[in-house]
Amino acid sequence: MKLLIANRGEIAVRIIRACREMGIRTVAVYSEADRLSPHVLMADEAWEIGPAPARDSYLRVDRILSAAQRSGAELVHPGYGFLAENAEFAEAVQASGLIWVGPPVDAIRRMGSKTESRHIAVAAGAPLVPGMMDPLEDLGELKAFVAEHGLPVLLKAVAGGGGKGMRAVHEASELAPAFDRARSEGKAYFGDERVYVERLVSEARHIEIQVAADTHGNAVFVGERECSIQRRHQKVIEECPSPVVGEDLRRRMGETALSIVRESGYTSVGTIEFLLAPDGRYYFLEMNTRLQVEHPVSEEVYGVDLAREQIRIALGQELSFAQEDLKPRGHAIECRVYAEDPLRNFAPSPGLISHLRAPSGPGVRIDSGVFEGTEVPLDYDPMLSKLIVWGKDRAEAVSRLRRALGEYQIRGIRTTLPLFRTLAETEAFEEAAFHTAFLDGFLAGENLEKLQGAQDPEAGEAALIAAACLAMMDSSRLPGDLFAHGDESEWHAEGLRQLHGRFPR
């Protein structure tokens, strides 16, 4: 059996590892910029699909399907991002006679629409944030909503995701420009300029429920994740379990999530996202019809392999666990390590990773898509890796996170590691006293000064020394899993020869 991964970076590596354990051969696809990326070298075979820009490679359905057919792949896994929640891609995969590792096409369409999913949530009995059930017709309708419900409000692209096409409005004078920007972003990112509006719940927490459902009628929820530390509506730190969700609330939110799963006809793994208000009430936000970036924290606490489960479901197999088997154990925290400069409003920081030392030891997991010597392109999402730690309780997990962050070194580019080191030492983080707007306030004043002092070197003497060391390193410094091929193919051998050029003896 052979599976093609229509993605790149750490999620492609994650899927390759799951497939290896299942005895499934893997096919990577790559752009010209990713020829020497870990996912390409780790897969059993790889096919180039175009130039660096995603629109010419990872978003080209025809080229991905051509690679699948030429390689003899039987399954296609979309990962997350790119085409993962694109119903037309899923439909094209199935029309080509391939197995789609994901939910039914109809469920992707219905739950991918922020307004349609709200209708489904209402039918399932889920509570909603007060807001419109259908897209706004014009600015006048938005102003009428504000006149009735007041400010602040949140504008959202109907087809949005990943924080794109979202605009918070606190003043009446901001309504028109926010409406225009939300529509513009929706059109640019998703090809759909429609937006809707809902009340903005202040100081809320972002809590999501991991779900899994097979084609035999079995459905479970795999606990909850705390995802409140965000920048630009995109998560940067996640935890499992949430520090503020007890057993009763977990059960109620989980049952609500499963009601939505059943109402939508959803199968595969997915996530139901909620807002948790300060008064304890929770509201349905949206569903992500894919494997989430933050799935590892659920895996660490519940002892499951969600990537493996997703593939099993696609193959028509039953879930390998029941609801009563899912007992949380300990606490896990994940930091998304981005090639971004938090001191410059998280501006991308592409370039050569001249030095990388990943942490290890008890309770530490790294899901990474780079290695020392990787050239980080500007063309894609800037996430480099995910640092996941586990402890017997949250206090131990926080302590372990601080230790692991202290060990983690990346030189040559700016990353978000200094932000995490600074944040992890604060009393607010230790006491889990945060909400979705927390990070905006954190990046100011005294904390900003601490962050400046914690920055890793980007250039100058330290980077030059690191680059000189890189030039003298032996190729044995390359990650061992790049060489884990008993039947090395010519494309793999050529990739390693090129890497030897970067790591001369």
Image: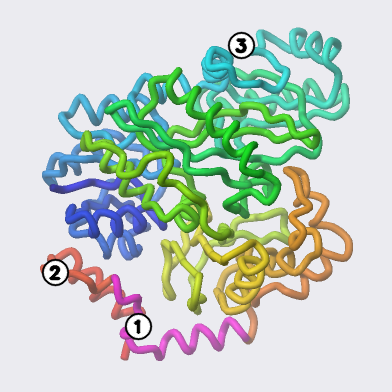
Q: Is residue 11 left or right of residue 124?
A: left
Q: Is residue 358 left or right of residue 155?
A: left
Report whether residue 380 is seen. no
- Nearest the camera: 19 or 369? 19
Q: Which residue is mark 3?
A: 134
- Bounds of the magenta span? 462-481
Q: Which residue is mark 2?
A: 488
* Quadrant of the drawing holding the C terminus: bottom left
Of pointers 1 and 3, the one earlier in the residue sequence: 3
Query: Residue 435: where, in percent of width, then height?
Result: 75, 45
* 266, above or below 317, in the image: above
Write the residue at 63% across / 46% down: 227
Does the magenta run of residues contain 471? yes
Q: Pointer 1 and pointer 2: residues touching (CB < 8 Å)?
A: no
Name the front one of labels 3 and 2. 3
Identify residue type, mark 1.
Answer: Phe
Q: Report crowding for label 1: few under 14, some 14 to 19, many 20 or more residues within 10 A (C-alpha).
A: many
Label 1 element class: loop
Q: Pointer 1 and pointer 3: residues touching (CB < 8 Å)?
A: no
Q: CA distance from mark 3 to mark 2?
A: 54 Å
Name the front one of labels 1 and 2. 2
Q: Pointer 3 and pointer 2: residues touching (CB < 8 Å)?
A: no
Write the residue at 70% across / 10% down: 138
Query: Residue 81: where, in percent of width, then height?
Result: 45, 41
Q: Is residue 284 left or right of residue 277?
A: left
Does the magenta run of residues contain 27? no
Write the residue at 22% across / 34% down: 316
Q: In the rendering, which numbered label is found on residue 503? A: 1
Identify residue type, mark 3.
Answer: Asp
* 21, above or below 324, in the image: below
Write the residue at 66% across / 61% down: 341
- Nearest the camera: 123 or 117? 123
